Image (cartoon, rainbow, N blue to C red):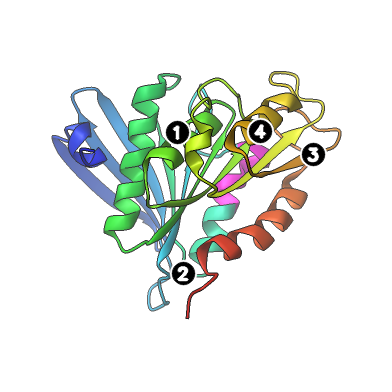
Amino acid sequence: MEPPLRALGVMASQSAMITPTLRHVELFTMRGLLSVLWHVPPSGSTIRPAAIVACGGAMGGMLGPADGLYQRVGDQWSSRGVPVLRVDYRKPNDMDSCCLDVAAAVQMATDAGARRVVVMGHSFGGAVAVRVGVVMDEVSGVITFSTQSAGCEVAAGMRGRALLLFHGDRDEILPLQSSEVVASIAGSGEVVVCEGDGHLLAHSAGAIVTRMEQWLPSVFFDGDT
């Protein structure tokens, strides 16, 4: 497979530090501008060989569900030495284009030293995360939030990699069954039901973070010496 960054056809790039721990990266291509907010560990800290790549839904966006969850994850995990890259698609709602964008971010993370990457996506982005997880060996796990099932027909290709799916039982856009179908196709995975919550999981941030605090270390660090 051609490396994603090469497939993007990047003509030029630039970056700037917004804060001491947040870098804004822009990649210019003939098919649009790919932007990444990259949470980096504080200066002098130990960088772990892991990373998180997060993507939004069909409309794009970089904050994620659950009241800005991706910002919270970025702050928390980068402070522990795990970089977090938040992707702003070149062309939202275009599956192939968005998958390439996220795959490019995974390559950026691995080029920077990550050996294990978790990709997370909300709604449409859940399918993007699954598809990238299927084709990239660097991806050790996938987390979805209110995922659609369309586009996840390839989920069996996860080959037993860690899969965690959050879904509200009052989702007004995509029913809970969407996540259940994806887990069934994958043949593995844990579906966490966010009771009483809708598509944006606005009331479940605490429960989501708590479960991820248990799940992510097992994906990133189990077996490390």
Q: Is residue 121 magenta?
A: no
Give whichever of discs 3 and 2 has the lower sequence position: 2
Crowdedness near tag 3: few (<14), some (14–19) or many (≥20) residues, C-alpha within 10 Å: many
Percent position of residue 32, x then y: 27, 25
Give whichever of discs 3 and 1 has the lower sequence position: 1
User: Residues at badges 2 and 1 in contact (C-beta under 8 Å)?
Assistant: no
Amino acid type of the residue that numbered disc 4 sits on in the rendered structure: Ser
Q: Is residue 81 above or below residue 126?
A: below
What residue does disc 3 label?
Answer: 194
Amino acid type of the residue that numbered disc 1 sits on in the rendered structure: Arg
Tag in front: 3 or 4: 4
Q: Name the residue furthest left.
A: 11
Crowdedness near tag 2: few (<14), some (14–19) or many (≥20) residues, C-alpha within 10 Å: some
Percent position of residue 79, x then y: 51, 67
Tag in front: 2 or 4: 4
What residue does disc 1 label?
Answer: 131
Amino acid type of the residue that numbered disc 2 sits on in the rendered structure: Gly
For the residues labelled 3 and 1, the Cα–Cα distance comes to 24 Å
Amino acid type of the residue that numbered disc 3 sits on in the rendered structure: Cys
> Is 209 situated left or right of 83 in this image?
right
Residue found 20% across the figure and 29% down from its top = 29
Residue 184 circle label: 4
For the residues labelled 4 and 1, the Cα–Cα distance comes to 15 Å
